[in-house]
């Protein structure tokens, strides 16, 4: 009998299924006048509370700083000793 009571709308997007930070645009304004990818939806524009965001949605990491790992080969090494 789940059809008798529809699911309540999402608390984040209020049922619009769009990110409530960037309003579904995928980008947010910076103070210096530029734009960055929305940190909440990773630039997808989707509400991350009621629907998952996948790599297919993102395509590329537009505006997001690349993550660095310890073995990136940046010339710094730590030695025990």
Image (cartoon, grey):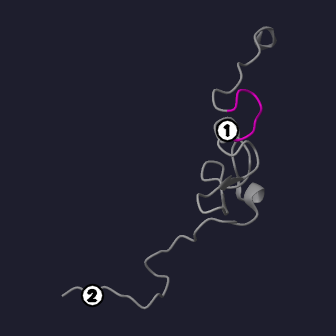
Of residue 79 and residue 40, the one placed in the foreground of this image is 40
Is the residue 58 above or below the residue 41 in the image? below
Please provide the residue range marked out in magenta. 13-20
* Residue count near mark 1 (Cα–Cα under 10 Å), binned few <14, some 14–19, many ≥20: some
- The residue shown at (66%, 55%) is 29
Q: How far apart are marks 2 and 1 (CA)?
A: 46 Å
Magenta region includes residue 19: yes
Residue pictured at 75% horizontal, 27% vertical? 15
Say if mark 2 contacts mark 1, CB within 8 Å. Answer: no
For the point 77% across and 58% down, which residue is it? 56
Secondary-structure class at tag 1: loop
Q: Among all residues in the image, which is located at the extreme front?
A: 32
Q: Where is residue 40 in the image (x, y as percent from the top left)?
A: 61, 48
In the image, taking residue 37 as reference, residue 59 lies left or right, namely right
Identified at 70% across, 19% down, the residue is 8
Q: Which residue lies furthest to the left in this view?
A: 81
Q: Position of residue 3 (x, y in %)?
A: 81, 13
Look at mark 1 in the image and give the residue it sits on: 20
Please indicate whether residue 67 sits to the left or right of residue 44 in the image. left
Of circles 2 and 1, the one toward us is 1
Image quarter (top left, top right, bottom left or bottom right) of the C terminus? bottom left
* Residue farthest toward the bottom in the current orientation of the protein: 75
Q: Give the image quarter of residue 37.
A: bottom right
Rendered image: mark on residue 33: none
Location of the N terminus by quadrant is: top right
Q: Where is residue 79 in the image (x, y as percent from the top left)?
A: 27, 87
Residue 22 magenta-highlighted: no
Residue that mark 2 sits on = 79
Q: Picture coordinates of residue 53 (x, y %)?
A: 69, 49
Q: Is residue 9 left or right of residue 31?
A: right
């Amino acid at each position: 009998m789940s059809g008798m009571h529809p699911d309540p709308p999402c608390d984040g997007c209020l049922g619009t299924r769009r990110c409530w930070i960037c309003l579904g645009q995928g980008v947010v304004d910076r103070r210096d006048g530029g734009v960055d990818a929305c940190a909440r939806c990773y630039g997808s524009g989707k509400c991350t509370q009621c629907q998952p965001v996948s790599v297919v949605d993102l395509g590329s990491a537009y505006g997001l700083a690349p993550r660095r790992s310890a073995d990136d080969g940046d010339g710094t090494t730590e030695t025990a000793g």
